[in-house]
Image: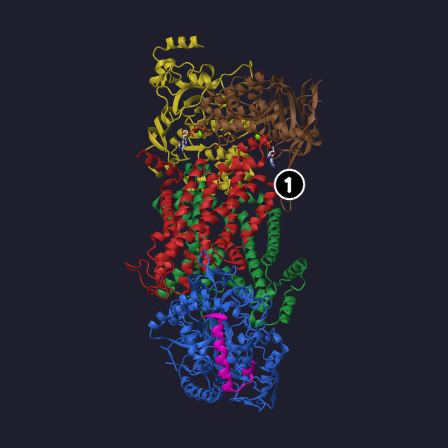
């Protein structure tokens, strides 16, 4: 085991601190925006009078005007895993709403991130190894171009071509409508089949970044002395390329995975909207439109937690890949 | 002649029974076929609309679902503007003083779990609204309305009123009857009702990420549906939903499709569109208390300056109806002042709009905007975010207003914010729809001064315009308890006054436009919304 | 002739490489369209009197939309909005990003800690989500607020990049030498370090500009853009809302997306050219 | 006796790095004291990481000492704020890397002239003074250089510009941290000669930090040998090189290639295997003469004969 | 006995935006079996480029512009790539300047040592570990260090590992490009001693490149002095030390402050090396040369054997009329 306990504690501690600050930020964000969520809710004609508004305020812990008190309540609830009750889904708890949506987003986003990382890696390496070649130049150009294509536009085009015109894929949604009555195998098939287009959208839109980063890294690694020495040793090109070059090029981009994850989750919002995909992006967007503060808080917290956890995992994996870290 | 709504309510039981008999006839026919008949209904349902199935709650559910699973005493048929009996066995009976209304129940009804349906369930459902004021969205238990709801035996319910309230039967359409034996164990205001039990034509089966699954209720008291399964496919935007209809993934929808899609949809002979006027009026709502807008001349100019025909043709591809300047939708038949609709005095005319302003003493300033007494006709214009097509119409209106010398600044706000602004009156111009209860009195009472409050205070009703007119108030108060003939006349007067005072600038009337496919299923009842529960009862596989 | 040749030489050094030149050409084309829009567009803005859903033809190169507007004209008018949103939001971002980056990179210590922790945190929450929140909570939504929102939220990556570059510069002797002769921190930051990281700033400016254009498109697509203004994003949003897919109206869907991508592509090519040259000059310093 | 120009008093520097759960600290400099007289050249030699640059940075207050004190003409740097502010005119530093020491974005004229303005030495146009300074460091004709940019100069010329800039502030002390290690030897000799000339002409005092004992001998009057943050030996340069006392100095001398020297008997030294020990003599793990005492007790800096200081139990 | 390495008229160029950099310009030298040959000169004079040119490790855009390199009689410049790969390390290994960057940071020492062995002897898998341990012993490193990663070793240890690696296949020529520059003198001393010991034991030849002329004079048999891409003098080390011929060599030698003997003022070499894209006409050293004569401005001196045949020098001072020139030079001093 290459871990050392200080490294572990440091990473976990740092994640916890980040989490705490993120939770605080989450608490403040909607409140800094102004507006009174309970009145906003009460004023929606469906939920009549002042009494209702007062009752709701009490329920949402907004009856005590002290922000500090509310913050205390919020943290207390949070510690019990209670994210409050969603306004728009009233009276469903936020945790249920998010719990239903999260697997879909995590599934697609993680798959897409890993796949695009892998593909970007292969393309970037191939390009850098033969830098200046036709392959390199054409992938470089395509990467620059793809880097600037909006997620949702790709999604619309995919729907137009593959779902509507060719009819190869469903128009959206996460599963077949008859999902409930399916056997386990059919369920898996249904989920995968429906995830293909959204995942592809996310891959295409995030691929370019990985290609560029890995290509740059490898270009840098290729100019290192140990690469020269590897050649001087008479090692085979493939060994030099992967065991020496790619391995080292991979390291700096590994921590960048986290930021790319944030980017992809951002893109997932529009992608999920276009594909009617019931993920956190869609929930978040609707929550924002509905002024559903508890749900916004919950969704943001959950995004933050996902990113922090993924980052933590990356941090914990890092020493396994880079021997220099554990002692560092 | 008698007043239309009540007459139609009286006529409906036979219609209902007719439906039942025909359904029963073809129901036996469908049972012969091998594989189950599945009908896909495509709907715009967001994730937050399937978190509960409690018909009392206004949030967290998709309300159209209850039409299939539950029954009201009466169903309002917007196609005909009539009431249709559901759990009521025919039209109820008014007492002589018109202060009690007695409804006989259709005792053939049974809960999905096999329990018998009784008057106690009806009483419970209404009492739940009384004890949980927050659930009483239409204020049935408000002043001058319900005093008590009591059962007479198992099969009769008596509604006692504080005052005369001729619209009561229409209001009865808004309350779904829930099973007392299930609900009494819960707090109806917080009950999530994950497996709803109703009396309706379809039984709840399950819900998943893509659909709500219903199956037929073979014992439905108005006749068993022919289709075995009703799948309500969930989409979160109408564009995809429309594509699904075009592809044949779904057979129909109760909801809105993007209007510009309609011409293309109809190129396909398999697709049909049922269109009927409805209870929603889209309008530029004006705050009649704000400087400038408190001048009827300005409001009138705005009304005249809107090219409603363009909005309907270009913005909505002809899929909506012209709105009457007198507000009342033509769904209310004879109560509606039909001649107002084509009255050239209210037709789009930019020149006349400017003449109106100039006649009222407004002069154009350097920037070409009218002004009087230091007040420039420059207003904020709120609209809902996340509605690009509506915003595009707003942008068109902005341009037309600019052309008649009225300047607007567009602000996008979220839906809750928009509602809040409407209620509190912190707006000048605001583009939104107004949806009224299915009753002409209620619809017109939108303009009653008791439904408003000064800017800064929340309105108790839909009079967001802060429109106050003593005559209108008097006429409406009189109509509330007048006989049919007088009511019609009073309503006409009210509508004329509204048209004249222009408290609100109409855009168009949004009714139903129900897309459905006829290539695989048949038997839709076009006298009802074709995808409503009562129509689907009769639909069968080709 | 010589003047021309010299000008060409100057351009070539500023926008190095073939890629840089292609980028410059694309950018110039868009600039021309943005500035001359009303002269180039065949029909007036928001003119709705044509047949709807016309396929591309001699009269309407990009057909018409559901309102009967000429798509090409709308695209040309939209260029202006997208262009200015990109450029101005890009500039705002740059000012904030450079200030935060240089100060935290140079000052170090708790200033850096505090600023960078803020950046880290903000990075956890997807920017688009934050933008949506801001956009929906602001009292109004016009092009100005779009620009402000984008400008105020997109500086995070830039601040990081400038910071690491500043830290690299801080290591180099001339900064220590400047301190040694008693220069004030502000002078060191803005007269000594700043000129040395201009290429990095330029490259970042270019990147945040593309981010701004994309963000505007995203906000418009979600119905949070200024509806009275035509932009590539609103065109795409309308195409989606009015179901251009159903009509196979690719002429309404493809152009705005391609325009966005092409515009950003041009910017990225330029930025990359600058960066590559900078790296070459600095012996491939890590960026 | 008058106050020495510069006096370092028990200087200590500890670098700490803080993680969330671990605080590491590293003592880079331990109890370093020395003095520098007007016109004197002092060389500090020692292996990489022994704390030489850290001392230089403390002397110029680029880095505040953790403990101890530097004083100029008897005025303590720690207590005297005015002195700290005008420090650039007392002491200046020449850095190792002339390629990085000049901001590539400014002209030579600006680089040399700007410090004059900053220190308010000269109001108005610094140009004549800049020309004078450039001439002084041998960049002639100065007019040719004043408008050039650093990239147009060779490494040696750059280091001359650095010296010109430093001279502009007329400091009494110049701390030169390996001023020639990045330059080719032939060019380094030029720079060393220039510094020696300047000392003569301007009565400058010089602290030279170097790896190279040869350069230290060539330039310095006195040599100070550092090991692991401590002074292990100091003395007049010729004497110290002719007759090194401390085992580390001997090892250093013997390892320095010198083809002109007759091969002396080799000292069997042990290669470093880890960081120097914190207790006892820090050199003991590599010292062929180490005894138990060296592990138990850290030796003090003793003066076995006047002017020669040694930190070793062998000389007590 | 024939020479092990024979370099003839080797030229290497770097095309750049401003023009072609002639980094190495037609240099010729030989290295005998078991000989330590040093290549010295100022920074940028083309020492590394020469080394990389010999073992075909030139990085783009550098290109071989002519000449021949023969190792053990085999012409290297024309050898196909896969043939050359077989020859690499087995006959010709290389040690580069910076210890840190010589080793792949993410591989254990063991892996990197066996890597070299297995690349050439794929069947040696079972024996490779033992051989790695043996190699470690050669350079006085404990065998348990095999499991370490490079960052866990000190700079000196890393450089020892690299030297051990270079010995792995018992090559006949080891090129060392400033192998100890980044190290402390004490450590450097230890490594050089070790290297000399190994050389004596295995008898391979070394091409040793450094800035540090005193060090080179101590350890090399023969030394070549390069200036601006040209070889200006080759001679046995003792001869260079006692009697440097080329003015550049003299200047170079006069740039190192000695540790022994009389302390005297050094003169160094004024000026700086020329731009290799447009080198000065005639002798390249002439602008910095105190003894330059008219012919130096126009005629490029050839590298000619000197009178006693021990060395070669390229300077007009030592032409056919050497005597006269030497007189002239004496006068000018
Ligand atoms: N800012 C810092 N933070 C932490 N440690 C430092 C810092 N600066 C220097 N050190 C450490 O202090 C020790 C002494 O460093 P210093 O630079 O003074 O050595 P030096 O003798 O100048 O070495 P060199 O000859 O390599 O320049 C080194 O071990 C170094 O790692
Ligand atoms: N990639 C390159 N492009 C252009 N010129 C180069 C390149 N690499 C090296 N050169 C030039 O080639 C010449 C020889 O370089 P080389 O590295 O061989 O010198 P060196 O003698 O090894 O110097 P040092 O002692 O500094 O290592 C130098 O003048 C250098 O400027
Ligand atoms: Mg140092
Ligand atoms: Mg070299």
Q: Chain of mark 1?
A: D
Element type at mark 1 = strand
Hue used for the chain lettered B: blue
Hue used for the chain lettered E: yellow
| Residue D59 appears anywhere in the view | no
User: What residue is shown with label 1?
Assistant: D24
- The image quarter containing residue B121 is bottom right
**Chain part drawn in magenta:** B477-506
In this rendered view, identify the residue nearer to me: B67 or E270. Answer: B67
Image location of residue A121, percent across then percent down = 44, 49
| Residue A118 appears anywhere in the view | yes
Q: Which chain is brown?
A: D
Q: Is residue B480 magenta?
A: yes
Determine whether the beta carbon of the residue marked 1 sits less than 8 angstroms from the nearest atom of ligand 1: no
Q: Which chain is red?
A: C
Hue used for the chain lettered A: green
- The image quarter containing residue B304 is bottom left
- The image quarter containing residue D5 is top right
Graded by Cα atoms within 10 Å as few (under 14), some (14 to 19) or many (20 or more), the crowding at tag 1 reads few
Total residue callouts? 1
In this rendered view, identify the residue nearer to me: D214 or E67. Answer: D214
Pick out the residue farthest to the left.
Answer: C58
Image location of residue D175, percent across then percent down = 59, 25
Is residue C264 shown above or below A48?
Answer: above
In the picture provided, is D60 more to the left or to the right than C238? right
Q: Is residue E42 magenta?
A: no
Main SS category, magenta section: helix
- Quadrant assignment for the N terminus of chain C: top left
Image location of residue D260, percent across then percent down = 52, 17
Is residue A57 shown above or below D200?
Answer: below
């Amino acid at each position: 085991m290459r871990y050392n306990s200080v490294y572990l504690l440091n990473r976990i501690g740092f994640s916890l601190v980040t989490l705490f600050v993120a939770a605080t930020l989450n608490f403040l964000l909607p409140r800094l925006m102004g507006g009174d969520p309970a009145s906003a809710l009460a004023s929606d004609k469906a939920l009549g009078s002042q009494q209702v508004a007062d009752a709701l305020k009490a329920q949402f812990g907004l009856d005590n005007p002290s922000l500090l008190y509310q913050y205390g309540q919020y943290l207390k609830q949070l510690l019990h895993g209670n994210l409050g009750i969603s306004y728009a889904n009233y009276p469903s708890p936020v945790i249920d709403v998010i719990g239903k949506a999260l697997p879909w987003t995590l599934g697609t986003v993680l798959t897409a991130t890993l796949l695009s990382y892998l593909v970007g890696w292969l393309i970037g390496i191939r390009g850098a190894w033969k830098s200046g070649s036709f392959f390199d130049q054409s992938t470089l150009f395509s990467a620059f171009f793809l880097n600037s294509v909006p997620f949702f536009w790709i999604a619309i085009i995919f729907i137009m071509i593959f779902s509507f015109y060719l009819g190869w894929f469903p128009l959206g949604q996460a599963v077949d409508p008859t999902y409930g009555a399916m056997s386990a195998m059919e369920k898996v098939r249904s989920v995968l089949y429906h995830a293909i287009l959204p995942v592809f959208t996310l891959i295409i839109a995030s691929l370019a970044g990985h290609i560029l980063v890995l290509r740059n890294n490898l270009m840098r690694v290729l100019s290192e002395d140990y690469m020269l020495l590897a050649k001087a040793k008479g090692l085979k090109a493939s060994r030099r390329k992967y065991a020496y070059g790619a391995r080292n090029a991979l390291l700096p981009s590994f921590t960048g995975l986290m930021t790319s994850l944030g980017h992809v989750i951002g893109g997932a919002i529009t992608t999920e909207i276009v594909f009617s995909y019931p993920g956190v992006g869609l929930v978040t967007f609707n929550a924002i439109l509905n002024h559903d503060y508890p749900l916004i808080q919950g969704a943001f917290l959950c995004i933050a937690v996902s990113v922090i956890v993924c980052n933590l995992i990356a941090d914990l994996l890092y020493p396994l890949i880079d021997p220099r870290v554990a002692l560092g | 002649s008698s007043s239309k709504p009540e007459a139609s309510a009286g006529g409906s039981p036979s219609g209902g029974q007719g439906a039942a008999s025909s359904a029963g006839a073809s129901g036996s026919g469908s049972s012969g076929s091998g594989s189950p008949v599945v009908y896909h209904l495509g709907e715009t349902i967001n994730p937050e609309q399937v978190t509960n199935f409690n018909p009392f709650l206004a949030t967290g559910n998709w309300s159209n679902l209850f039409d299939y699973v539950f029954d009201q005493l009466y169903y309002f048929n917007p196609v005909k503007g009539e009431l249709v009996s559901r759990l009521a066995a025919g039209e109820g009976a008014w007492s002589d003083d018109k202060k009690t209304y007695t409804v006989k129940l259709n005792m053939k009804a049974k809960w999905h779990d096999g329990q018998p349906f009784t008057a106690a369930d009806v009483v419970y459902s209404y009492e739940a609204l009384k004890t949980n004021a927050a659930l009483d969205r239409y204020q049935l238990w408000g002043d001058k309305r319900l005093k008590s709801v009591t059962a007479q035996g198992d099969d009769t319910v008596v509604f006692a009123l504080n005052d005369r309230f001729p619209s009561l039967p229409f209001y009865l359409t808004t309350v779904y009857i829930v099973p007392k034996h299930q609900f009494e164990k819960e707090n109806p205001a917080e009950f999530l009702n994950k497996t709803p039990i109703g009396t309706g034509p379809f039984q709840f089966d399950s819900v998943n990420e893509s659909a709500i699954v219903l199956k037929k209720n073979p014992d439905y008291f108005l006749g068993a549906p022919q289709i075995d399964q009703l799948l309500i496919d969930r989409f979160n935007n109408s564009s995809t939903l429309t594509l699904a209809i075009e592809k044949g993934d779904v057979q129909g929808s109760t909801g809105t499709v993007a209007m510009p899609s309609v011409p293309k949809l109809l190129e396909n002979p398999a697709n049909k569109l049922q269109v009927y006027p409805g209870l929603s009026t889209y309008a530029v709502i004006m705050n009649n208390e704000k400087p400038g807008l408190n001048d009827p001349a300005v409001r009138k100019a705005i009304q005249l300056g809107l090219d409603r025909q363009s909005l309907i043709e270009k913005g909505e591809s002809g899929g909506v109806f012209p709105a009457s300047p007198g507000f009342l939708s033509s769904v209310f038949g004879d109560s509606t002042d039909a001649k107002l609709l084509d009255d050239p005095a209210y037709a789009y005319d930019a020149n006349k709009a400017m003449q109106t302003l100039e006649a009222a003493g407004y002069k154009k300033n350097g920037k070409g905007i009218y002004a009087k007494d230091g007040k420039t006709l420059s207003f904020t214009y709120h609209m809902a975010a996340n509605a690009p097509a509506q915003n595009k119409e707003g942008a068109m209106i902005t341009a037309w207003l600019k052309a008649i010398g009225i300047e607007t600044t567009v602000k996008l706000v979220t839906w809750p914010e928009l509602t809040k602004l409407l209620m509190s009156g912190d707006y000048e111009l605001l583009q939104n729809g107004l949806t009224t209860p299915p009753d002409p009195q209620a619809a017109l009472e939108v303009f009653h001064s008791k439904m408003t409050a000064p800017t800064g205070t929340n309105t108790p009703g839909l009079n967001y315009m802060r429109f106050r007119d003593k005559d209108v108030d008097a006429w409406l108060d009189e109509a509330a308890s007048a006989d049919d003939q007088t009511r019609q006349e009073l309503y006409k007067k009210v509508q004329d006054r509204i048209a004249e005072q222009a408290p609100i600038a109409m855009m168009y009337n949004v009714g139903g436009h129900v897309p459905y496919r006829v290539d695989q299923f048949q038997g839709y009842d076009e006298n009802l919304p074709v995808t409503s529960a009562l129509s689907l009862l009769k639909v069968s596989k080709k | 002739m010589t003047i021309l040749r010299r000008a060409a030489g100057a351009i070539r050094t500023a926008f190095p490489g073939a890629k840089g030149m292609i980028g410059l050409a694309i950018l110039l084309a868009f600039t021309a369209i943005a500035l001359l829009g009303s002269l180039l567009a065949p029909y007036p803005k928001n003119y709705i009197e044509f047949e709807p859903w016309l396929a591309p033809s001699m009269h309407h190169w990009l057909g018409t939309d559901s309102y009967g507007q000429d798509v090409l004209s709308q695209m040309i008018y939209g260029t202006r909005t997208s262009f200015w949103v990109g450029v101005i939001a890009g500039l705002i971002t740059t000012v904030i990003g450079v200030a935060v980056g240089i100060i935290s990179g140079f000052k170090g210590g708790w200033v850096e800690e505090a600023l960078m922790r803020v950046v880290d945190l903000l990075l956890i929450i997807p920017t688009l989500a934050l933008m949506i929140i801001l956009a929906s909570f602001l009292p109004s939504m016009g092009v100005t607020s779009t620009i402000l929102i984008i400008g105020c939220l997109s500086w995070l990556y830039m601040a990081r990049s400038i910071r690491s570059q500043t830290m690299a510069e801080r290591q180099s002797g001339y900064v220590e030498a400047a301190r040694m002769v008693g220069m004030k921190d502000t002078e060191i930051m803005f007269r000594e370090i700043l000129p040395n990281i201009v290429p990095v700033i330029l490259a970042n400016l270019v990147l945040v500009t593309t981010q701004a254009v994309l963000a505007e498109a995203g906000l418009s697509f979600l119905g949070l853009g200024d509806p009275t203004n035509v932009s590539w994003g609103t065109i795409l949003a309308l195409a989606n809302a009015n179901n251009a897919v159903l009509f196979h109206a690719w002429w309404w869907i493809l152009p705005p997306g391609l325009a966005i991508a092409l515009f950003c592509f041009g910017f990225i090519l330029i930025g990359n050219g600058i960066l590559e040259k900078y790296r070459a000059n600095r012996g491939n310093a890590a960026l | 006796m008058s106050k020495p120009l510069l006096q370092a008093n028990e200087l200590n520097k500890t670098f700490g790095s803080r993680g969330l759960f671990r605080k590491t600290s590293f003592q880079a400099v331990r109890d370093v004291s020395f003095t520098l007289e007007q016109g004197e050249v002092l060389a500090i030699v020692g292996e990489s990481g022994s704390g030489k640059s850290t001392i230089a940075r403390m002397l110029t207050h680029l880095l505040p000492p953790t403990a101890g004190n530097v004083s100029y003409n008897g005025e303590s740097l720690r207590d005297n704020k005015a002195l700290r502010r005008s420090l650039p005119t007392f002491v200046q530093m020449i850095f190792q890397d002339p390629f990085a020491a000049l901001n590539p974005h400014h002209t030579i004229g600006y680089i040399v002239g700007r410090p004059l303005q900053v220190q308010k030495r000269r109001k108005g146009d610094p140009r004549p003074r800049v020309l004078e300074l450039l001439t002084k460091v041998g960049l002639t004709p100065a007019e040719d250089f004043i408008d050039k940019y650093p990239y147009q100069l060779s490494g040696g010329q750059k280091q001359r510009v650095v010296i010109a800039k430093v001279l502009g502030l007329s400091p009494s002390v110049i701390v030169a941290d390996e001023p020639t290690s990045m330059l080719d030897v032939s060019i380094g000799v030029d720079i060393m000669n220039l510094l020696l000339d300047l000392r003569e002409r301007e009565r400058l005092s010089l602290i030279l930090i170097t790896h190279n004992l040869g350069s230290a001998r060539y330039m310095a009057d006195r040599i100070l040998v550092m090991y692991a943050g401590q002074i292990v030996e100091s003395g007049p340069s010729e004497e110290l090189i002719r007759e090194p006392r401390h085992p580390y100095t001997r090892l250093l001398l013997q390892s320095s290639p010198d083809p002109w020297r007759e091969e002396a008997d080799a000292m069997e030294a042990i290669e470093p295997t880890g960081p120097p020990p914190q207790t006892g003599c820090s050199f003991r793990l590599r010292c062929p003469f180490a005894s138990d005492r060296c592990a138990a007790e850290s030796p003090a800096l003793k003066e076995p004969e006047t002017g020669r200081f040694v930190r070793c139990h062998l000389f007590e | 006995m024939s020479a092990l390495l024979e370099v003839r008229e080797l030229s290497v160029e770097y095309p750049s935006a401003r023009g072609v950099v002639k980094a190495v310009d037609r240099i010729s030298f030989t290295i005998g079996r078991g000989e330590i040959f040093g290549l010295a000169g100022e920074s940028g004079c083309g020492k590394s480029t020469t080394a990389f040119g010999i073992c075909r490790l030139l990085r783009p855009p550098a290109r071989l512009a002519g000449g021949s390199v023969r190792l053990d009689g085999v012409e290297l410049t024309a050898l196909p790539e896969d043939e050359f790969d077989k020859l690499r390390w087995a006959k010709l290994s290389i040690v580069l300047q910076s210890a840190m960057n010589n080793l792949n940071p993410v591989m254990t020492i063991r892996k990197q040592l066996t890597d070299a062995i297995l690349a050439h002897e794929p069947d040696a898998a079972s024996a490779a570990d033992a051989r790695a341990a043996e190699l470690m012993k050669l350079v006085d490193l404990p065998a348990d260090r095999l499991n370490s990663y490079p960052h866990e070793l000190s700079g000196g240890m890393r450089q020892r590992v690299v030297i051990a690696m270079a010995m792995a296949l018992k090559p006949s020529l080891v090129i060392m490009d400033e192998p100890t520059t980044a190290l402390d003198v004490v450590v450097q001393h230890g490594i050089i001693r070790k290297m000399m010991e190994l050389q004596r034991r295995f008898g391979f030849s070394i091409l040793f490149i450094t800035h540090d002329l005193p060090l080179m004079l101590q350890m090399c048999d023969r030394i070549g002095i390069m200036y601006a891409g040209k070889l200006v003098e080759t001679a046995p080390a003792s001869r260079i030390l006692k009697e440097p011929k080329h003015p550049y060599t003299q200047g170079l030698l006069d740039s190192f402050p000695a540790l022994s003997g009389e302390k005297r003022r050094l003169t160094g070499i004024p000026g700086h090396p020329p731009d290799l894209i447009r080198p000065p006409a005639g002798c390249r050293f002439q602008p910095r040369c105190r003894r330059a004569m008219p012919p130096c401005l126009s005629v490029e001196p050839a590298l000619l054997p000197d009178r006693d045949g021990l060395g070669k020098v390229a300077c007009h001072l030592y032409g056919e009329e050497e005597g006269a020139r030497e007189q002239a030079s004496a006068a000018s001093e």
